[in-house]
Structures are given as C-alpha cells and as structure tokens.
Image (cartoon, rainbow, N blue to C red):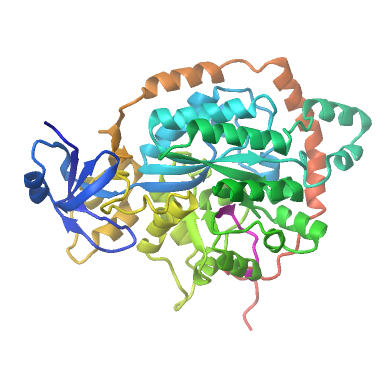
C-alpha cells in the first residue's frame, strides 16, 4: 500500500540562507509534514511502495514567501489603462468591478507558478455590505488553489480623499464639484466594531493549519488612534498577528509629523501598537530612531522594491534596517516590475537597489535576500515555526525548479549552486509546487482548478462596457484631480539626509 510521498532532485537546498547542498537529495513527506530527509536511494529503500515525485532534472528548494500583496490577478493597467503614478494619485481610481474570487484565483496561480507557497494578503475592501463578502471570496480562492495564506483584514476610518479631514478637503472645492465628489466618492467605511465582527466570523470559518486571519490597519494615516488601539486590543485578545502599511510615501510622513508632532513609528510605539507579532509593509520614510524602535520591538518590515519604484515612493533603507537587527521580509504588492510576480527577479532587484557605490560599503549576498523570501517571510506571516526551510517536522511546502536552464550550457565547479539560482533563476523555471504536502502545480499545470476557465471568467467580466455610475465617477475624478495634486504639492517635505547616496551634483573641490 502506498504511503506518503518521496520528492527527489539532483540537488536539495534545505535552507536557502545557507550554502549547504545535498546531492541526490530527497524528502519523505507524510500528510502535511516532512518526515525524513536524505539521499534518494536511501529513502526509497527505507520507504518502499511510495509515490515518487521529481528526479534528476530538478533542484529542490523551500517554498518562497510573498509577504505583502492584495490578491489582484488583473493589474490596473490591464483593466483600465491605469498607469503607474505617485501612490496617492494612483490610489484614486474608478474601475468597473470584476469578480473578486476569480481575480484572486488568478493572482494566486501567478504566485504559485513563480515558486511562492505562502503569502500575506493585505485586504483593502472598505465598503459596508461588500467587504465581508469580498474577504470570503478571496479566502475561498486561496483555499481552492491551495496556497498558504495569512489574511490581514484591513481597517480604515478616515482621510478618504487626501491626508486631511474629509470635510475640510471638500470645503475647499467649488460648490458644484463638492456636491459631485460627495456623492460619487462618499466616505462609507464600516465601523471598527463591524470589522471586529467580520474578523471573528472569518476566524471561526476559515482559520486552519494552512490559513490564519490577522488584524490589519490600512495605514496609520487612514486609521484613528481609536481604531489602532482596538486593533491592538483584539490582536492581543485572540493572539494573532497584525499587518499594516507604514510610511510608504513622503506625504504620509509629512502628514503624520504635522498632525502628531512626531514620527509615525514613535507614535505607534507610544500607544503600544508595535510588537513582535506586527509586520509593516514598505517603511520607506523611516528615520534611524524609527529603525531602532522597530528593532527593539521585534517588528518585521516587508520590503516591496518594485512597488516602491513604480509608485515613486522611494527606496526603503533596508541596509540600515538589517544592520540594526530589524527582520526584513520581501513582498511584491501585486506590482512586480513585469506584472508577473517573478519573485526571483524581485530578489535580484532588492539586492541591486541597496548596493551603493564605493569599495568597502556593505552589500547583499544571495543568502541574505533568500532569507527575506523564506525565514523572514515565515515570521511576517506568523508561520515561522512551520515553514521557511526543508527540515524534519516542518510543513511540506516544496518547490521543484528545473536545473538545466539555470546551468546551461556550463557551470563551474567553483560556484555555489545556491548563488547561481539567485543570479539566474526565473519563475519560469519552477516546475512543480507542493503546499502542505499536496501537489498544487505539476509540470506547470495546476491540479485543482483550470487556468483557462478562470481567464474566461475574468475576460468576460472585464470586457463589459463601464456603466453610467463608473463613467460618472471617472468624470468627477478628472475634475477633482487638480485639487488633490495641489494639496500634495503644498505639503512636499524637504529631504535633507537620505540613507543612500547614488550620485552627486556637487562640483569637485
């Protein structure tokens, strides 16, 4: 009788932060766990009549982790030609709705086919009557495709238009435009108590060994202290993680400094929000004092290099964070450079962004960046005891990468295969993926759901001509945009001491 599964390859790298390679390495998996690790012939003899997966064509690595994304399968460029822009301008949009379930299924497939086995979803639906159902649709999608997910239920209760009280901003608009904006973009957030009710229901129905529900604040600029304190209280009560966007843009930094007289990180620390269970996406505009606080409190920062570049947010001081002992994970924010969720490219981008000119400056090594996409990601998603490496007792989240395209036509014996994977690996080379001991993709074919059927559903929904309400919102948005731009133009802060220096306009003396 067949029992368990042996996954084998030409090589096995059990921990991508270490340069340890097991030739003819294999895993014996039973249920959702790794039960044994060893050489293929030894395991085959030890566990006969066992299903065999893999072979000499493959390199076996731990599943990779995308620690911040929003479940968007169709990008905004695809849906409506909504091009990259400054974050605050980009966030203002009027799109025709598409099915949340199928959009998230497509996003999840894209992650898995690039070797991602676990993700942190930052939920950003804020409309009463719709946010709970959208969260349910997304959670169903993750379960149906088979990825491991930490689902952060987002909360927001202020600053619908710009980083300013909604009524103050509306008062500054011409009367006719004010009326149209109030109608077309009326702030309509659920109360925090409603969100807490959603959270309890989602945990009761969807929480399991493969899915965890987190509390989530959208950003501190969009959440009152009351909301933040209730989030912290609830997280402490049920012992779950907390996820939020933190200082993604210089406008957020300036707004918070003007309104609370201190940095956002210092304020979050002062109200007792920051803990080891907290993960913060972006953290581009932090100070060294902020970094020290993040280190002391054990917070994990999730770096999103492509997104920060595409939305002109800046470059997070990741080198200073790591040097100060901050755990830094990696996220793609549904905004990878090629719109394709290639996490291998994201890792290379991360490394090269933070390597400054000058002999003697610290720089990234492959193991450090792989650590961001494995061990630090496991901490950010709160699965740190279960995933990130291929060890006995860990969850069987496993990726089989085709060996030949990485090494073709020649590979020196003097180079580490782990390092070659870092420099030459692509999502396209991922062949087979297991999550929780179950094969979710084999030979780049998904085992649980048809990609073609998902694409057909999304094509049909996205092809519908925008209705009158959407067209009106777009027209109103076009008239409002100059006022939004003026608001931010008037608050742009002065950047005096950047963490990184890449060039200079100073004359040589």
Q: In this picture, is 429 found above or below 478? A: below
Where does residue 87 sit, x and y in percent of width and height? 66, 45
Say whether residue 455 is left or right of residue 231: left
- Indicate yes or no whether the magenta region holds residue 287: yes
In the image, farthest residue toward the right = 175
Seen at 43% across and 34% down, the residue is 108
223 vs 260: above or below: above
Q: Based on the picture, tell me whether residue 223 belongs to the magenta stretch.
A: no
Residue at x 9%, y 36% (from the top left corner): 49
- The x and y percentages for residue 482 are 80, 40
Viewer-side residue, 323 vs 241? 241
Whole-percent x, y for residue 210 in the image? 41, 39
Residue nearer the viewer, 358 or 378: 378
Q: Is residue 461 visible?
A: yes
Quarter of the C terminus within the rendering:
bottom right
Q: Is residue 88 left or right of residue 17?
A: right
Q: What's the residue at 25%, 55% (across, down)?
A: 13
Residue 484 appears at what percent x and percent y?
A: 79, 42
Direction from residue 298 to residue 109 in the image, left or right: left
**Quadrant occupied by the N terminus:** top left
Q: Nearer the viewer, residue 465 or 7?
A: 7
Residue situated furthest front in the rendering: 237
Q: Specify whether residue 74 is in view.
A: no
Residue 287 relative to residue 317: left or right = right
Circle count: 0
The image quadrant of residue 391 is bottom left
Magenta-drawn segment: 278-288
Q: Relative to residue 235, is residue 83 depicted above or below?
A: above
């Amino acid at each position: 009788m067949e029992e368990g599964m042996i996954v084998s390859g030409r090589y096995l790298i059990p921990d991508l932060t270490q340069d340890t390679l097991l030739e003819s390495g294999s895993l014996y998996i039973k249920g959702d766990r790794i039960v044994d690790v060893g050489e293929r012939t030894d395991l085959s003899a030890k566990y006969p009549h066992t299903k065999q997966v893999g072979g000499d064509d493959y390199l076996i690595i731990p599943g990779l982790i995308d620690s911040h994304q929003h479940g968007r399968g169709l990008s905004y460029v695809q849906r409506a030609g909504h091009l990259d822009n400054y974050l605050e301008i980009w966030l203002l949009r009027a799109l025709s709705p598409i099915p949340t379930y199928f959009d998230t299924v497509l996003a999840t497939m894209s992650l898995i086919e690039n070797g991602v086995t676990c993700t942190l979803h930052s939920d950003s639906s804020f409309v009463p009557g719709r946010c709970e159902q959208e969260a349910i649709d997304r959670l169903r999608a993750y379960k149906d495709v088979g990825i491991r997910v930490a689902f952060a239920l987002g909360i927001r209760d202020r600053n619908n238009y710009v980083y300013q009280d909604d009524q103050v901003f509306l008062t500054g608009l011409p009367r006719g435009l004010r009326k149209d904006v109030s109608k077309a973009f009326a702030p309509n957030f659920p109360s925090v108590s409603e969100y807490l009710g959603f959270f309890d229901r989602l945990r009761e129905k969807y929480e399991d060994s493969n899915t965890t529900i987190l509390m989530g604040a959208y950003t501190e600029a969009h959440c009152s202290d009351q909301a933040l304190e209730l989030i912290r209280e609830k997280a402490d009560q049920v012992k779950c993680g907390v996820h939020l966007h933190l200082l993604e843009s210089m406008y957020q930094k300036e707004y918070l400094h003007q309104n609370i007289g201190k940095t956002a990180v210092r304020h979050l620390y002062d109200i007792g929000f920051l803990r080891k269970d907290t993960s913060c996406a972006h953290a581009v505009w932090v100070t060294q004092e902020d970094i020290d606080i993040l280190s002391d409190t054990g917070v994990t920062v999730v770096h999103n290099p492509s997104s920060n570049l595409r939305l002109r947010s800046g470059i997070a001081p990741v080198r200073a964070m790591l040097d100060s002992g901050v755990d830094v994970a990696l996220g793609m924010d549904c905004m990878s450079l090629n719109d394709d969720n290639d996490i291998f490219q994201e890792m290379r981008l991360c490394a090269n962004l933070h390597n400054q000119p000058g002999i003697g400056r610290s720089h990234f090594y492959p193991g450090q960046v792989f650590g961001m996409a494995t061990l630090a990601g496991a901490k950010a998603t709160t699965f740190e005891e279960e995933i990130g490496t291929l060890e006995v007792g860990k969850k069987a989240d496993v990726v089989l990468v085709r060996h030949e395209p990485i090494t073709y036509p020649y590979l020196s014996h003097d180079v580490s295969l782990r390092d070659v994977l870092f420099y030459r690996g692509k999502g396209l080379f991922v062949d087979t993926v297991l999550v929780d001991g179950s094969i979710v993709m084999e030979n780049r074919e998904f085992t649980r759901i048809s990609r073609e059927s998902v694409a057909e559903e999304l094509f049909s929904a996205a092809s519908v001509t925008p209705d009158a309400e959407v067209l009106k919102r777009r027209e109103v948005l076009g008239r409002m945009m100059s006022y939004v731009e003026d608001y931010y133009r008037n608050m742009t802060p002065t950047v005096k001491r950047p963490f990184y220096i890449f060039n200079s306009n100073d004359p040589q003396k």
